[in-house]
Image (cartoon, rainbow, N blue to C red):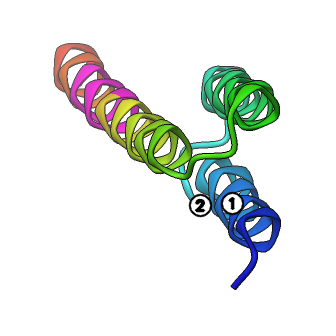
């Protein structure tokens, strides 16, 4: 496969991450930041390693955000009930 096709696949994956997570502005901001960073890095040098790392960082940061929000939500629900 061509590197540009793989770049587009990873961008679609990063774009789907906020959709399947908690709907909030922060996952969208993280995804857009890492998509921009991947495209900018691909223009400088056409390697896939930074793009794969950006996809992993994007997924990891959105996952950590979701875990954090769920924990805070459960604490607040217990405090209010």
In the image, which disc is placed on residue 49? none
Q: Which residue is mark 2?
A: 20
Q: Quadrant of residue 44?
A: top right
Q: Is residue 80 magenta?
A: no
As helix, strand or loop, the secondary structure at mark 2 comes to helix
Q: CA distance from mark 2 to mark 1?
A: 7 Å
The magenta-colored residue range is 65-72
Instruction: Indicate whether 10 appears above or below 74.
Output: below
Please tell me which residue lies in front, 23 or 79.
23
Residue 13 is situated, as x and y percent measured from the top left of the image, at 64, 63
Q: Quadrant location of residue 66?
A: top left
Residue 72 location (% of width, % of height): 27, 19
Taking the spot 79% from the left edge, 73% from the top edge, the residue there is 5
> Does residue 45 lie above or below 40 as drawn?
below
Name the residue beneath numbered marker 1. 16
The quarter of the image holding the C terminus is top left
């Amino acid at each position: 496969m061509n590197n540009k096709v793989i770049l587009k696949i990873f961008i679609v994956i990063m774009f789907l991450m906020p959709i399947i997570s908690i709907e909030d502005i922060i996952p969208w901001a993280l995804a857009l930041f890492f998509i921009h960073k991947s495209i900018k890095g691909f223009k400088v040098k056409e390697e896939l390693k930074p793009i794969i790392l950006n996809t992993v960082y994007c997924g990891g940061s959105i996952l950590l955000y979701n875990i954090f929000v769920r924990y805070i939500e459960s604490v607040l629900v217990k405090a209010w009930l």
